[in-house]
Amino acid sequence: MRAPQQLGRFGTWIAVGALVWHALAILSPAWVLTFQQTKARDFASYYYAVQVGHDGGDPYDKVQLSAAARDDGMRNGVHPFLYAPPFLLAASWVRGFELPQAFHLWFWLDELCAVAVGIALWRWWRPLGTQVGPVIAVVMGLMTAIPNNHAMGQANLPGMLLAITGLWQVERGRRELGGVLMGAACMLKMSPALFVAWWLVRREWTAVIAAVATGVALSVLSLPFAGPAVQWNFYTHVLPTFSNGDYNGLAVPIGLFGNHSIPNLLDGILPTPAATLSPAAQWAASLVNAGLLGLLGWAFWPRDAGAGDDPDALRFRYAAQASCVGVLLLLLPVYTYEHHLVFAIPAAVLSVLAVQQGRLPRTWAVPVGLAVAVLLFDLQTIKGLAEAMPPALVAVGAVLRELKFGALVLLLASTERLGHVPAAAAAPVPATAT
């Protein structure tokens, strides 16, 4: 492997420019819109779920949530609450604020989480080259999905921060701590459970046990907000609805522009008048998803050591596998909207680094560059272009509709290639002290 090229001062200035652009052209307009918004968008579901749970009600009952919102005089109704019971414990701080105040405060707390994600990723990946910091700054500085998280009141970034730090700690050999952090991430966002499944493939038993134990412990601690009956209802009734698109009665069409998942694509091919996936689309999605899980499990399965990979190659492979799983958890669910795309940040960063360092062939430079550019680009602009297409160019509009889905698929392919374990090379990743 040839020595990585140095970005040097030019790369540093590009990174600084990206961060300035983020602050002035991306974050500031999002804050202005958020400050003018008092109904709190998706954040209202968390806010009223905490209120209902604290008062002894069922936070997964949309009727009770909407009643609490009307009693508050702020909204006529809210989307159903979809997160695991321990989320209520983490969000209990909102009880000290009125809805608009809590929403506006969350905007800046979420931005701090984004900054922390970038720092954690840099600390974890510093051994991969001096380009790591500038590339992270450029990708995160220009990614419009980050302020979209803030403005929508979404909670992806706290869960991502816990997941990133958990992955980092396991790579350092601190498997108990990494498992605890990942278990907490799973209780904030269910999708990081896919990282735990990946640890099973890698036989990281200690980390897996710690993650499961943490989930159980947090569930017990959240009993004051969600009693045994409520928690049983979540795991036996609410959670299963995620597989068919019902999502506990979520009144959002699966085919809404900006849904970037495999089930959404299949819903368009095998539609139904109902609000959920058709039985054919469910079966097709299950088969495709199972196939992807099986293929990646085989690609990442540890083989007998023998090729003598150097520690840097092993470390890069571990990072690539984790990044690939981060993209996969976006493609599998029925709903994957713009705010979810932050989980693709590691894949975008690592794919760019791989092209710079020659770990990917030069032929990958253009597709990786286009995929990253599409991932960072503003979704509403893409939507406007698609809707402006005349009838003669309806096919172009259809391509624009799936641009970000295509970008995710390409990043999945690039990180799978980087993380693939050769038949005779599978020494465990060495622990680092970084």
Image: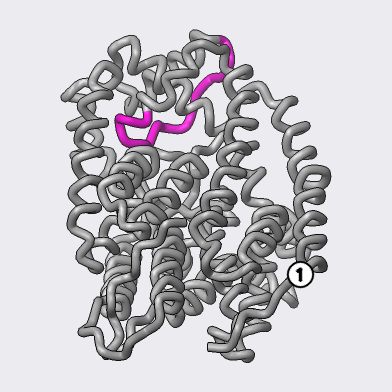
Q: Position of residue 325 (x, y in %)?
A: 39, 64
Visible residue check, residue 401: no
Q: Which residues are magenta?
A: 73-87
Quadrant location of residue 305?
A: bottom left
Q: 262 above or below 96?
A: below
For this rendering, which residue is in front, 422 or 386?
A: 422
Q: Which amino acid type is shown beneath numbered disc 1?
A: Gly
On the question of residue 49 being in view, the answer is yes
Q: Residue at x 33, y 10 (%)?
A: 55
Question: Helix or strand or loop: what does disc 1 sit on?
Answer: helix
Q: Residue 31 versus residue 355: which sits nearer the camera? A: 355
Q: Is residue 21 left or right of residue 66?
A: right
Q: Is residue 341 magenta?
A: no
Q: Which one is in front, 140 or 79?
A: 140
Color theme of the render: one colour
Badge count: 1
| Residue placed under numbered mark 1 in the picture | 8
Residue depicted at x 48% and y 54%: 336
Locate residue 40, reporting x and y percent: 60, 26
**Vertical order, 119 against 428 (above or below):** above
